[in-house]
Image (cartoon, rainbow, N blue to C red):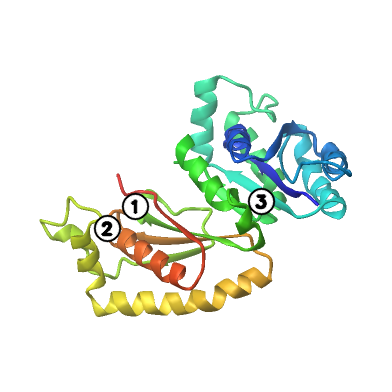
Protein backbone atom coordinates (compact mmCIF):
# COMPACT_ATOMS: atom_id res chain seq x y z
CA UNK A 1 0.00 0.00 0.00
CA UNK A 2 1.06 3.58 -0.58
CA UNK A 3 2.78 5.84 1.93
CA UNK A 4 0.77 9.02 2.66
CA UNK A 5 1.69 12.42 4.04
CA UNK A 6 -1.03 14.95 4.80
CA UNK A 7 0.40 18.47 4.59
CA UNK A 8 -1.58 20.63 6.99
CA UNK A 9 -0.98 23.85 8.86
CA UNK A 10 -1.77 27.50 9.09
CA UNK A 11 -2.74 29.40 5.97
CA UNK A 12 0.35 31.26 4.77
CA UNK A 13 2.77 28.95 6.59
CA UNK A 14 4.09 27.39 3.38
CA UNK A 15 1.87 24.47 2.37
CA UNK A 16 2.11 25.24 -1.35
CA UNK A 17 5.90 25.46 -1.17
CA UNK A 18 5.97 22.18 0.74
CA UNK A 19 3.88 20.61 -2.02
CA UNK A 20 6.48 21.68 -4.58
CA UNK A 21 9.23 20.18 -2.43
CA UNK A 22 7.44 16.85 -2.15
CA UNK A 23 6.89 16.81 -5.91
CA UNK A 24 10.62 17.39 -6.44
CA UNK A 25 11.27 14.39 -4.19
CA UNK A 26 9.15 12.16 -6.41
CA UNK A 27 5.92 12.11 -4.41
CA UNK A 28 2.53 12.18 -6.15
CA UNK A 29 1.06 15.49 -4.90
CA UNK A 30 -2.52 16.76 -4.81
CA UNK A 31 -2.85 20.36 -3.65
CA UNK A 32 -5.76 22.06 -1.84
CA UNK A 33 -7.72 18.82 -1.44
CA UNK A 34 -11.04 18.90 0.47
CA UNK A 35 -10.60 16.48 3.38
CA UNK A 36 -13.67 14.44 2.43
CA UNK A 37 -11.91 13.36 -0.76
CA UNK A 38 -8.80 11.96 0.93
CA UNK A 39 -10.11 8.42 1.26
CA UNK A 40 -11.20 8.51 -2.40
CA UNK A 41 -7.63 9.29 -3.41
CA UNK A 42 -6.40 6.27 -1.46
CA UNK A 43 -8.83 4.04 -3.37
CA UNK A 44 -7.28 5.18 -6.66
CA UNK A 45 -3.66 5.14 -5.47
CA UNK A 46 -3.96 1.64 -3.99
CA UNK A 47 -5.99 0.16 -6.85
CA UNK A 48 -4.52 -2.91 -8.60
CA UNK A 49 -1.94 -1.90 -11.19
CA UNK A 50 -1.31 1.54 -9.67
CA UNK A 51 2.32 2.68 -9.79
CA UNK A 52 1.80 5.31 -7.08
CA UNK A 53 3.64 4.42 -3.88
CA UNK A 54 4.06 7.82 -2.14
CA UNK A 55 1.24 10.37 -1.95
CA UNK A 56 1.32 13.87 -0.45
CA UNK A 57 -2.09 15.44 0.14
CA UNK A 58 -2.19 19.19 0.81
CA UNK A 59 -5.25 19.74 2.96
CA UNK A 60 -7.65 22.50 2.00
CA UNK A 61 -8.09 25.20 4.64
CA UNK A 62 -10.71 27.62 5.87
CA UNK A 63 -14.14 26.03 6.38
CA UNK A 64 -12.53 22.59 5.85
CA UNK A 65 -10.39 22.83 8.99
CA UNK A 66 -12.96 21.28 11.34
CA UNK A 67 -13.34 18.25 9.04
CA UNK A 68 -9.65 17.49 8.70
CA UNK A 69 -8.96 15.24 11.69
CA UNK A 70 -11.94 13.00 10.92
CA UNK A 71 -10.88 12.72 7.29
CA UNK A 72 -7.36 11.72 8.33
CA UNK A 73 -8.83 9.03 10.61
CA UNK A 74 -10.85 7.70 7.64
CA UNK A 75 -7.72 7.72 5.48
CA UNK A 76 -5.83 5.70 8.09
CA UNK A 77 -8.55 3.05 8.07
CA UNK A 78 -8.42 2.66 4.30
CA UNK A 79 -4.78 3.34 3.43
CA UNK A 80 -1.25 2.33 4.35
CA UNK A 81 1.07 4.47 6.43
CA UNK A 82 -0.33 7.97 7.05
CA UNK A 83 1.70 10.80 8.60
CA UNK A 84 0.84 14.45 9.18
CA UNK A 85 3.27 17.26 8.39
CA UNK A 86 2.10 20.39 10.20
CA UNK A 87 3.47 23.79 9.18
CA UNK A 88 3.52 26.29 12.02
CA UNK A 89 4.28 30.04 11.90
CA UNK A 90 4.10 33.02 14.23
CA UNK A 91 1.10 35.32 13.95
CA UNK A 92 3.34 38.34 13.40
CA UNK A 93 5.06 36.69 10.43
CA UNK A 94 1.77 35.49 8.94
CA UNK A 95 0.41 39.04 9.12
CA UNK A 96 3.51 40.28 7.30
CA UNK A 97 3.12 37.65 4.57
CA UNK A 98 -0.56 38.45 4.04
CA UNK A 99 0.19 42.17 3.87
CA UNK A 100 2.83 41.49 1.23
CA UNK A 101 0.60 39.31 -0.94
CA UNK A 102 -2.62 41.27 -0.21
CA UNK A 103 -4.51 38.01 -0.15
CA UNK A 104 -7.57 37.42 2.02
CA UNK A 105 -7.30 34.95 4.89
CA UNK A 106 -9.76 32.05 4.40
CA UNK A 107 -11.32 32.66 7.83
CA UNK A 108 -11.66 36.43 7.48
CA UNK A 109 -15.17 37.54 8.46
CA UNK A 110 -14.65 41.24 8.95
CA UNK A 111 -12.55 40.84 12.09
CA UNK A 112 -8.86 41.66 12.18
CA UNK A 113 -6.35 39.49 10.35
CA UNK A 114 -4.82 38.52 13.70
CA UNK A 115 -8.23 37.26 14.89
CA UNK A 116 -8.61 35.11 11.77
CA UNK A 117 -5.14 33.62 12.22
CA UNK A 118 -5.75 32.81 15.88
CA UNK A 119 -9.16 31.29 15.06
CA UNK A 120 -7.52 28.98 12.52
CA UNK A 121 -4.73 28.15 14.97
CA UNK A 122 -7.35 27.06 17.52
CA UNK A 123 -9.26 24.98 14.95
CA UNK A 124 -6.11 23.18 13.84
CA UNK A 125 -4.67 22.48 17.30
CA UNK A 126 -5.99 18.86 17.36
CA UNK A 127 -4.35 18.24 13.97
CA UNK A 128 -1.08 19.75 15.20
CA UNK A 129 -1.19 17.51 18.27
CA UNK A 130 -1.47 14.44 16.00
CA UNK A 131 1.35 15.49 13.64
CA UNK A 132 4.38 13.28 13.13
CA UNK A 133 6.46 16.26 12.00
CA UNK A 134 6.00 19.94 12.93
CA UNK A 135 8.03 22.58 11.09
CA UNK A 136 8.02 26.21 12.18
CA UNK A 137 8.50 28.27 9.01
CA UNK A 138 8.63 31.66 10.77
CA UNK A 139 12.32 32.20 10.01
CA UNK A 140 12.83 29.66 7.21
CA UNK A 141 13.44 30.61 3.59
CA UNK A 142 12.31 28.30 0.79
CA UNK A 143 15.68 26.55 0.67
CA UNK A 144 15.71 25.84 4.41
CA UNK A 145 12.14 24.52 4.27
CA UNK A 146 13.13 22.24 1.39
CA UNK A 147 16.07 20.92 3.40
CA UNK A 148 13.87 20.21 6.44
CA UNK A 149 11.34 18.33 4.31
CA UNK A 150 14.07 16.41 2.51
CA UNK A 151 15.57 15.40 5.84
CA UNK A 152 12.25 14.07 7.14
CA UNK A 153 10.69 12.59 3.99
CA UNK A 154 13.25 12.51 1.20
CA UNK A 155 14.78 9.06 1.57
CA UNK A 156 12.56 6.02 1.04
CA UNK A 157 14.88 3.84 3.09
CA UNK A 158 14.19 6.09 6.07
CA UNK A 159 10.47 5.30 5.89
CA UNK A 160 10.94 2.29 8.15
CA UNK A 161 12.73 4.28 10.84
CA UNK A 162 12.83 7.66 12.48
CA UNK A 163 14.55 10.80 11.27
CA UNK A 164 16.41 12.82 13.90
CA UNK A 165 17.29 16.49 13.54
CA UNK A 166 19.66 18.40 15.82
CA UNK A 167 19.39 22.17 15.58
CA UNK A 168 21.29 24.94 17.35
CA UNK A 169 19.61 28.24 18.23
CA UNK A 170 20.03 31.40 20.29
CA UNK A 171 17.69 32.02 23.21
CA UNK A 172 17.73 35.75 22.51
CA UNK A 173 16.13 35.01 19.12
CA UNK A 174 13.35 32.90 20.64
CA UNK A 175 12.72 29.23 21.31
CA UNK A 176 12.12 26.91 18.32
CA UNK A 177 8.47 26.00 18.87
CA UNK A 178 8.65 22.82 16.79
CA UNK A 179 11.36 21.17 18.93
CA UNK A 180 10.56 17.95 20.79
CA UNK A 181 13.47 18.30 23.24
CA UNK A 182 15.37 21.49 24.22
CA UNK A 183 18.74 21.69 25.99
CA UNK A 184 20.33 24.86 27.38
CA UNK A 185 24.15 25.05 27.10
CA UNK A 186 24.58 28.60 28.42
CA UNK A 187 26.41 27.14 31.45
CA UNK A 188 29.45 26.40 29.24
CA UNK A 189 32.39 28.82 28.78
CA UNK A 190 31.39 31.44 26.22
CA UNK A 191 33.79 32.02 23.28
CA UNK A 192 32.15 35.41 22.76
CA UNK A 193 34.38 36.77 25.53
CA UNK A 194 37.58 35.59 23.82
CA UNK A 195 38.61 38.28 21.35
CA UNK A 196 40.10 35.99 18.71
CA UNK A 197 37.10 33.62 18.86
CA UNK A 198 34.29 36.18 18.85
CA UNK A 199 34.07 36.62 15.03
CA UNK A 200 34.16 32.85 14.46
CA UNK A 201 31.37 30.27 14.87
CA UNK A 202 31.05 26.86 16.44
CA UNK A 203 31.90 25.32 13.08
CA UNK A 204 35.46 26.64 13.35
CA UNK A 205 37.92 24.19 14.99
CA UNK A 206 39.24 26.81 17.41
CA UNK A 207 35.78 27.51 18.80
CA UNK A 208 34.84 23.83 18.84
CA UNK A 209 37.97 22.94 20.79
CA UNK A 210 37.42 25.81 23.23
CA UNK A 211 33.83 24.72 23.95
CA UNK A 212 34.54 20.99 24.19
CA UNK A 213 37.70 21.38 26.27
CA UNK A 214 35.82 21.89 29.53
CA UNK A 215 34.96 18.95 31.77
CA UNK A 216 31.36 20.21 31.91
CA UNK A 217 31.02 20.04 28.12
CA UNK A 218 32.37 16.51 27.92
CA UNK A 219 30.14 15.32 30.78
CA UNK A 220 27.11 17.01 29.22
CA UNK A 221 27.61 15.45 25.78
CA UNK A 222 28.31 12.05 27.34
CA UNK A 223 25.11 12.13 29.38
CA UNK A 224 22.77 13.30 26.61
CA UNK A 225 24.34 10.75 24.25
CA UNK A 226 23.52 8.06 26.83
CA UNK A 227 20.02 9.51 27.16
CA UNK A 228 19.31 9.29 23.44
CA UNK A 229 20.85 5.82 23.23
CA UNK A 230 17.91 4.90 25.49
CA UNK A 231 15.26 7.19 23.97
CA UNK A 232 15.74 6.71 20.23
CA UNK A 233 14.87 2.96 20.18
CA UNK A 234 11.89 3.68 22.49
CA UNK A 235 10.61 6.43 20.17
CA UNK A 236 10.99 4.10 17.20
CA UNK A 237 8.97 1.38 18.92
CA UNK A 238 6.20 3.90 19.50
CA UNK A 239 6.17 4.73 15.78
CA UNK A 240 7.55 8.28 16.04
CA UNK A 241 8.64 9.40 12.57
CA UNK A 242 10.68 12.51 13.40
CA UNK A 243 12.60 13.69 16.46
CA UNK A 244 13.71 17.32 16.71
CA UNK A 245 16.42 18.15 19.27
CA UNK A 246 17.22 21.82 19.91
CA UNK A 247 20.44 23.01 21.57
CA UNK A 248 20.45 26.63 22.72
CA UNK A 249 23.01 29.18 23.88
CA UNK A 250 22.72 32.96 24.14
CA UNK A 251 23.18 34.00 20.51
CA UNK A 252 23.23 30.69 18.64
CA UNK A 253 26.72 31.16 17.08
CA UNK A 254 29.25 29.42 19.31
CA UNK A 255 28.41 26.98 22.10
CA UNK A 256 25.13 25.59 20.75
CA UNK A 257 26.67 25.10 17.30
CA UNK A 258 29.70 23.20 18.62
CA UNK A 259 27.60 21.02 20.92
CA UNK A 260 25.03 20.30 18.18
CA UNK A 261 27.78 19.16 15.82
CA UNK A 262 29.29 16.93 18.49
CA UNK A 263 25.92 15.44 19.44
CA UNK A 264 25.20 14.79 15.77
CA UNK A 265 28.47 12.87 15.48
CA UNK A 266 27.68 10.85 18.61
CA UNK A 267 24.20 9.92 17.36
CA UNK A 268 25.54 8.94 13.95
CA UNK A 269 28.00 6.65 15.71
CA UNK A 270 25.02 4.97 17.39
CA UNK A 271 23.54 4.25 13.96
CA UNK A 272 20.91 7.01 14.09
CA UNK A 273 20.41 8.98 10.83
CA UNK A 274 20.86 12.64 11.83
CA UNK A 275 20.69 16.02 10.15
CA UNK A 276 22.35 18.98 11.90
CA UNK A 277 21.43 22.60 11.22
CA UNK A 278 22.08 25.98 12.82
CA UNK A 279 19.17 28.43 12.93
CA UNK A 280 20.91 31.55 14.20
CA UNK A 281 24.53 31.08 13.20
CA UNK A 282 24.51 34.10 10.85
CA UNK A 283 22.76 36.50 13.24
> Mark 2 Cα within 10 Å, few/some/many (few <14, many 20+)?
many
Q: Is residue 161 left or right of residue 230?
A: right
Residue 202 at what x, y percent from top left? 27, 58
Res 154 label: none
Looking at the rendered structure, the secondary structure element under dot 2 is loop
Residue picked out by circle 2: 202
Viewer-proximal residue among 99 and 138: 138
Q: Residues within 10 Å of mark 3 (few under 14, many from 20)?
A: many
Residue pictured at 64% horizontal, 33% vertical = 116
The residue depicted at 24 percent of the width and 67 percent of the height is 211
The kind of secondary structure element at disc 1 is: helix
Are the two marked residues, 2 and 1, in contact with CB atoms closer than 8 angstroms?
no
Q: Which residue ends up furthest to the top in the rendered image?
A: 102
- Name the image quarter holding the C terminus: top left
Relative to 149, 206 lies left or right: left
Label 3, label 2: how far apart the Cα atoms are: 33 Å
Mark 1 — residue?
172
Amino acid sequence: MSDYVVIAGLSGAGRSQAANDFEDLGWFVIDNLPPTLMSKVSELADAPGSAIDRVALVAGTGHYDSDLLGAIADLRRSAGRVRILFLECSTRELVRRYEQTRRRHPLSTGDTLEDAIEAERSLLEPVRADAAVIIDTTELNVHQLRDRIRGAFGQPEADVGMQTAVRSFGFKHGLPIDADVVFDVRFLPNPHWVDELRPLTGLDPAVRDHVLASDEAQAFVDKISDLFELLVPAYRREGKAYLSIAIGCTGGRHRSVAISEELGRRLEALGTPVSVSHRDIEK
